[in-house]
Structures are given as structure tokens and as C-alpha cells.
Amino acid sequence: HAVAGWFREYTDPVVKVSIVPRGMAALGYAQSLPQERYLYTKEALVDRMVMTMGGRVAEEIIFGQITTGAQNDLEKITKMAYAMVVDYGMSEEIGYVSFNLSGQRDQPQFNKPFSDDLARRIDLEVKRIIDDVRVQTRELLDERADDMERLAQALLEKEVLNENDLKEVLGPRPYQRPEHEVGVTAEGEPVNLPPGPASPTSEGDGLATDTPR
């Protein structure tokens, strides 16, 4: 997760990585600082999916087999892919449509707002998006195999790495936070937001989100 997120343009900056288990839910985690953002481009969503896919693809590369550990990651990726297709109109195959199904994915649909044929096409498009994300993730991690190995060795030595440690191991992040992020007002008009807060490096900042491994 950390390596994939570090080298993708639109992912939230990774500020901490740990191999210390957090209960049964996570055997380690990559912590990212959420950017002040209300709108996401298609490219940004794909980058976030690539980062989320990192753990499963790393299992394939390093161990040659997969485990159940990526279940939560795959669930997030699947929901995001469906949202791109049926909510955000981000699929050329399906078109500029929105059925506003976010938050209703786990609820029974008694009045399906599209035909069985369109449902089949949606499923195929979602699979295509996820397959493409997997290919992009595999290409990135194959290219960054040495970085994964250095990061693994650093984690075995220190167990927890902060942002400065990550810069020493992986080098400067190639994509920096833009000067201004784009958001929307309550009326839906675009506005410019000031740069977000500095990246925290301590456990108690409360600003970061976790991607479990």
C-alpha cells in the first residue's frame, strides 16, 4: 500500500507505515493524510484503487500466492468501481448516467432502475476497471520491487516508519500536493481551498486515515 501510494499522483500523502498488529483486523497499516478535497477526478479514483490494491498484488509478487487478508481492500475497490460506473458517469461504455446507488449497494433493489442487459454490461465494465487497476498495480510494484524490499527491511528494523523515514527509503515523493485544491460551496459552485495542514508524524494527530494490511 505504501509503495503504491507513494508513487501515484493523486493518492493522499503517506505519513506512517507500521508492521505492528492492531488487533485481529490489521497486521500492520499504511497511514495517509487526507487532502482537503470535495471533488475527485476519474484519475484520482483510479490512483486510490491502485493504492488499495497494493497489498493483494504484493502477495502475488513476493509469495506467489494470495491470502484472505485483502478482503476489505477488495470490497472498497469493488464499491468504488461500481460508483464510478453507476453513480458518477465515468464509464464511456455505460455513458453519462447516474442511478444514485451509493449507500444502497447492500440493500435489496425491488425496483431496479435499469434493464437486465444494462446490469450485465455494468458488471462487465466494473470487472474491466478492476482488472485494469490490477494490471497498473502489478506494473508499478514490479518496477518498484527494490523499493518494496528496502521498505520491508526498514520495517523489520524499526517496525514503525514516519514520513521522514519513508523519504530516506523511497526518496522524495515525485508528486507534491498542489498549491490549491478544488472544492465546492454549499451551493455547488467551485471554490479554491487553501493548502491543507502539514503532514503529521506522531500517532495522536488524528488527521490521518489507515489502510490496513
Image (cartoon, grey):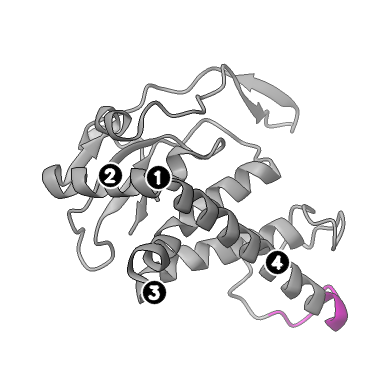
Residue plotted at (30% across, 31% down): 163
- Direction from residue 203 to residue 57 in the image, left or right: right
- C-alpha separation, residue under disc 4 versus residue under disc 2: 31 Å
Camera-nearest residue between 80 and 62: 62
Q: Is residue 174 above or below residue 213?
A: above
Q: CA distance from mark 1 to mark 3?
A: 19 Å
- In the rendered structure, which amino acid carries the disc numbered 3? Ile
N-term-proximal mark, 1 vs 3: 1
Helix, strand or loop for disc 4: helix
Residue 105 sits inside the magenta stretch: no
Q: Which mark is residue 3?
A: 1
Residue 213: quadrant of the picture: bottom left
Question: Which residue was labeled with disc 3?
Answer: 66
Which amino acid type corresponds to the residue marked 4 in the rendered image? Answer: Arg
Q: Are marks 4 and 2 in contact (CB under 8 Å)?
A: no
Which label belongs to residue 128?
Answer: 4
Mark 3 crowdedness (10 Å alpha carbons): few <14, some 14-19, many ≥20: some
Q: Position of residue 35 (x, y in %)?
A: 49, 32
**Between 138 and 43, the one nearer to me in the picture:** 138
Q: CA–CA distance between discs 2 and 3?
A: 20 Å
**Label of residue 151 in the image:** 2
